[in-house]
Amino acid sequence: MIYKNKIIIVKIVMILICIITINFFTKKNEYKANNNKILILCEESKEYEQEKNELNDFDILNKIDKNNLHLKGTTYFYLNNVTPFNDLSNLIDEINYLKQNGIKFFIEASPVFVNTNLKAMGRFAECLRYAQSNGGRVIMSFPIMNSKKANGDSINSDLIYNSVKLAFDNYTNYWVYPVGISVDESLIYKKELKNILECTNTLFLNSKYDSNYDIDDSTIKSYDNVIQKIDLDNYTKNSKNNLYAKRAIYIESNYDFEEFKKNVDKIIKKEISFTSNSDLSSYMKFDNEVKSNVNGVFFNNKNVTPQRFISEDEYKSAFDTNNNNREENQDKADLTASNKVLEILSLVSLIIFLVMLILSKNIERKRFFK
C-alpha cells in the first residue's frame, strides 16, 4: 500500500514539473503589455518577425519600459512662440478652442525687457492672463543670445542673468506667472549659463527631432523636469522610440486659426492622451518665486491660481486703487507730521510765553520794592 502511494505521489510530482516547464517556456516567448493592442515577442519566437512588422502599424503613444513592460511617459500640449506681435484676437480664439476640447496646455511667451508701460504690453499681458485662467500655464523662452558682442568680447553671464530676471519680474508685475524656461538644447551644456538656468527646475528643450538625449548626463539629471519639444507632424509620422520620457507636442501659435483647428483636430483623432500641466511640479525663482503644482500656482507662497479672467481695465483699476490708497496714506502721514510740528511749535511758544511772564513779574516786583 505504501509502495502504491509512493508511485502516485511521484506521478503527481512529475505531472506538476511538466506543467511548470511548459508554462515557463511559453511565457518566455510571449508577453502582453497593458495595452491590449500591443503584443511583444522575444526574438527566439517563430512569430517574431511577423509580429514585429505588425507593431509598426500601431500608433504607440508612449515608450515601453522593457524591464516591466508598462507603458510610460508623459505628453503635454504646448502652444509655441507667443510674442507681443502675435495677432492677439487669433490667440484668444486658439485658447478658447483648446479649452473647448478640454486640453490643458503650456503657452510659451517671449521675454520682454523694455517698454513694459506701453499699451501693447498691457494687451499682451491681458492675453496671457486669459490663457492662465483657461487652462494654460506660462513658459518663458530664453533670450536670443549672440555668443559675442559687436566688439568681439564675450557676453557677461551676469548681464544675461539680469536680463532673464528682468523679464521674469516684468511678467509677474502684470500677474503673469512663468513656471519654466524654453531653451535650445545646446545651451544647457554651457557652464557660463548654468547659474542662469538653475533659476528653474523645468526646461522645455528646442532640439532636432532625432537628437539623442543622454538621460544619465549629469547636466540633464540636475533638473527635475527636462521636456523635449516636438512638432505635431514629426510626432505623428515617425517612430516614438526616439522620444524622451517627457515630451511636449507643440503647435505654432501664429498659424491661421482654421489651420490651428485642423492641427488640434488631428490630435483629437489620434486619441493622444495629454498629461495635465498641473501634474508638473515646477518653479522659477529669482528675488521672487513662482511655484506650480497640483494645488495651483503660488507667488511667494501666496496662492495666485486664477479663478477668473482679469481684464486690462480691472488690472489697471486695481493698481489705481492701490495708488490712491498709497496717496491717502501719504497725505495722512504728511498731516500727522505737520500736526506734530505744530504741537511742538505751540509747546515752545507756550514755554517762551511762560518764561517771559515770570521774568516780567520779577522785574515788576524789583521795581516795587525799590
Image: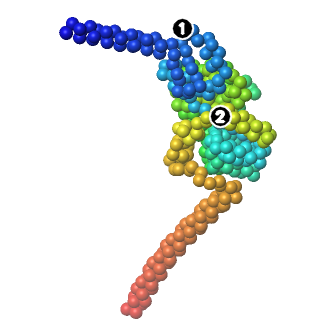
Q: Is residue 329 above or below residue 138?
A: below
SS state under label 2: loop
SS state under label 1: loop
Give the residue at x 49% y 72%. 344
- Circle 1: residue type: Glu
Q: In the image shown, does 355 or 257 lie closer to the viewer?
A: 257
| Residue at which label 2 appears | 271
Q: Earlier in the sequence, mark 1 or mark 2?
A: 1
Cα–Cα gap, marks 1 and 2: 33 Å
Give the residue at x 55% y 66%. 333
Callout 1 touching callout 2 (CB < 8 Å):
no
Q: In the image shown, does 37 or 266 lie closer to the viewer?
A: 37
Q: In the image shown, does 284 or 245 lie closer to the viewer?
A: 245
Residue 360 x, y percent position in the rendering? 45, 85
**Numbered label attached to residue 44:** 1
Q: Is residue 199 above or below residue 42?
A: below
Q: Is residue 1 left or right of residue 223?
A: left
Q: Is residue 186 visible?
A: no
Residue 328 x, y percent position in the rendering? 59, 67
Q: Is residue 120 visible?
A: yes
